[in-house]
Amino acid sequence: MGHLPVVHGGTGYRFLNVAVSLTRVVRFFATHRYYVPSWTPEKNREVFGALGDPPGHGHDYQCGVTVRGPLGPEGLIVDLRLLDGILQQEVLDPLHQQHLNEVIPACADGKMLPTCEALAAHLFPRIQARLPGGVVLERLRISEDATLYADCTEHTG
């Protein structure tokens, strides 16, 4: 196993030429329903099956947030207490035990389906805006279960 190149500075060690990221995962339970209000109940049933039945169905979601930034002298990219507080306020408090069709504005009244992709796109800018300078939100992953997830990354093109 190789060693990271290290330079000792006045206040600690600095790792050279390495990219470091950190991922924190939080879990929450929420309900959602796939339906288009302008369609008939029959059309919704044909397209979405049981996923369109009221009141909806629930998932034990996971939200994984990957951040990157300079590794500070103490060996941290970001203070975990700060990151955990952001996830508490932006993910857990507003979404846990909630119906996503009702609490995500873009999904209200069936404007957009409350998919993993829509949820990831909803959360990404909120979390990104709360991170301290120099810390970048590299990826936000929403998982409905072990077989379905969506990743949201910043568009750079």
Image (cartoon, grey):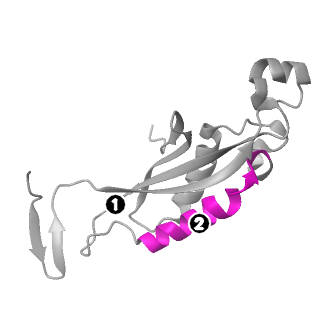
Callout count: 2
Q: What amino acid type should be assigned to the residue bearing mark 1?
A: Gly
Q: Residue at x 10, y 65 (%)?
A: 6
Where residue 84 sits: x, y (%)?
50, 67
Residue 94 is inside the magenta segment = yes
Mark 2 highlights which residue? 88
Residue displayed at 80% across by 49% down: 102
113 or 18: nearer the eye?
Answer: 113
Magenta stretch encompasses residue 7? no
Q: Residue 60 bears which disc, if any?
A: none
Image location of residue 128, percent across then percent down: 52, 57
Quarter holding residue 52: top right
In this rendering, position of residue 63 left or right of residue 157: right
Magenta stretch, main secondary structure class: helix
Q: Residues within 10 Å of mark 2 (few under 14, many from 20)?
A: some
Q: Is residue 22 toward the left or the right of residue 4 in the image?
A: right
Disc sitting over residue 69 in the figure: 1
Q: Which amino acid lies under the numbered mark 2 shown in the image of this protein? A: Gln
Dot 1, crowdedness within 10 Å: few (<14), some or many (≥20)? some
Q: Earlier in the sequence, mark 1 or mark 2?
A: 1
Question: In the picture provided, is 121 more to the left or to the right than 2?
Answer: right
Location of residue 140 with respect to 79 vertically, above or below: above
Residue pictured at 61% horizontal, 48% vertical: 60
Q: Residue at 25% across / 53% down in the picture?
A: 19
Mark 1–mark 2 distance (CA, rounded to whole Å) = 21 Å
**For residue 137, above or below residue 116:** below
Q: Position of residue 76 (x, y in %)?
A: 31, 69
Of helix, strand and loop, which one carries label 2?
Answer: helix
Question: What residue range appears in magenta?
Answer: 80-101
